[in-house]
Image (cartoon, coloured by chain):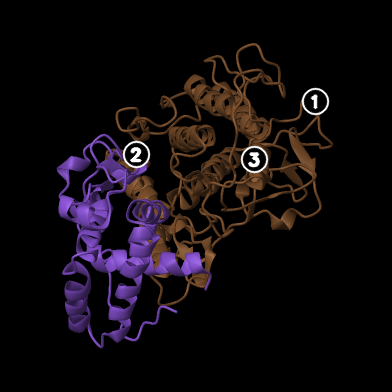
Chain colours: A purple, B brown
Amino acid sequence: MVKEVYQVHQFVELSGALTDFNALALNGTGQVNDYLHTLTNIVGEEIVEQLLSTFSAVYEASADETMFINGIRQQILGDVKLGPVARNLIKLWYTGTWYQLPNSWREGFGKSEQDTTFFVSSASYTEGLLWQAIDANPSGAKGPGYGSWSQPPRINFNNAWQFKPSTKFR
Amino acid sequence: MSDRVINSIEDLYQMLDAAVQLEHATIPPYLTALYSIKTETNPEASAVIRAVLVEEMLHITLAANVLNSLGKHPDFEAKDFVPSYPTYLPDGESEFLVSIDKFSSTTLDTFLQIERPSKWVPQLDSKFKGCVKRSNHHVFELKAVKPLKSSTYSFYSIGDFYEAIREGIEYLEDQANQKGETIFIGDPKFQVSNRYYYSGGGEVVEVFDKTSALNALELIIEQGEGHTHQIFNEQGELSHYYRFQQLKLGQYYQTGDSPDHPTGPKFEVDYKNVHPVKCNPKVADFPDDSELKQAALQFNENYQAFLSTINRAFRGGQEELIGAVCGMFRLKECASQLIRNPLPSNPLVNGGPTFEMRYDSIELKAKSIKTWETA
């Protein structure tokens, strides 16, 4: 697999595990490349590589979902360096906003000038997963049609991410 | 002296039924091209395609209102209503296929073909007005492309097709009036009005008589191909052909311009910022266990249910259009999702909505409500 394609694939699966939206939903937002680009710009290629390879290693070493979840908790979310980055990624996917990383992290690992709180693009706002999660339209965008508010939200879990044992990333 | 295309009320019913089918047939290609354009790129192309697309929806409604005014209803559930793409639409000597595809220079050429103005010289090489003779008639799936009772002639353009309908209405209504009758015997309650149809490319015309019927058809013709070959219509709107031509030429028309020579602001069309949709995607192209296949099947199912809702709306239940519009926004999201997802087998090519309808389960139901053919 070409390096970029491989990295995008890993990034989509990591994002899926962190947000619980599958590849169809994540690709469906049209934001995958912009978010990977934003992440790389701010935390740097090295940390992105470390995050993705840790994720792949945990995934490939897990015999079942419980093992996988424990692995992600301990090695990514519980990690001093990777944890805040992964949490930022979750917020990015849900809101379309990059939030400035915590000061403790910035002092230890970063302080990129681009690490400020900002919307990645106007599309990232409308494509935030939070709107899908609650079946609402982003305020001021994606008008759902007259009278749609009289209908109860149709929340479905068809696009939930799934752990598939024996997955190999290379 | 050319033969009239429409000579009986049955001819007129079928032509209007075909008109609804023809207008709808342009929607899957326009919609797919529009949503293949990446967000925040190509604002000019997006705006042009979107404007034409919503006007096609208005044309469906107008054609359906005319049919309803004659006491018949369109059938959105008929087995051949959604064509299988690629498909043929009216064209001249060099036939062209219309595909579900990404926005590209080739796609734009096809759109120009679809919307091309009728020939400046009204008399083509045909004994039927606005028609051309062709040898491969069997390939045309749409009822709209040929006058009834002719196995070798097809309309040159969509405008020519509507001219034939207009002529037919004038002729048949005159005949009826001479006997003290009218062809406009439809119940007014079946007319879809602006009360339920909104934000869709203009105002709906409710049809009760010859004047309103001709007004409705006039609006379709004007928006589609302009009036007497002017690029702007009386409301100052550009006809579809010239709207698309602006994208081809990278320049806007402005008032006073002559055909093929726009002098307004220039812009760039960026064909690279487009999702690489597979041309004429089919559900069978997606791997069996893929999320993409499930999503494509789901889209088709929802689209078919949406057509059923529209069908009811044109058969007396026009309040259903309120919900149908909400359904359209959901369909848009599903279509965009398919268009933005790479094929599992080839990450460089994306999926897309396939618009393949299933008729096995609803065939009987469709048959039972196909009222005008059995009436």
The residue drawn where x is 56% and y is 14% is B234
**Residue B162 percent across, percent down from the top left:** 61, 32
The residue drawn where x is 63% and y is 46% is B107
Considering the numbered disc 2 on the image, is that residue within a helix, a strand or a loop?
helix
**Residue B71 percent across, percent down from the top left:** 44, 37
Q: Residue furthest top?
A: B256
**Residue B35 percent across, percent down from the top left:** 47, 47
Q: Residues within 10 Å of mark 2 (few under 14, many from 20)?
A: few
Tell me, yes or no, if residue B368 can be seen here: no
Considering the numbered disc 3 on the image, is that residue within a helix, a strand or a loop?
helix
What residue does disc 2 label? A122
Give the numbered dot on residue B121.
1
Front disc: 1 or 3: 3
What residue does disc 3 label? B114
**C-alpha span from label 1 to label 3:** 19 Å
Front disc: 2 or 1: 2
B267 or B69: nearer the viewer: B267
Q: Of the two numbered discs 1 and 3 on the same chain, state the one appearing first in sequence.
A: 3
**Residue B22 percent across, percent down from the top left:** 56, 44
The residue drawn where x is 41% and y is 24% is B203
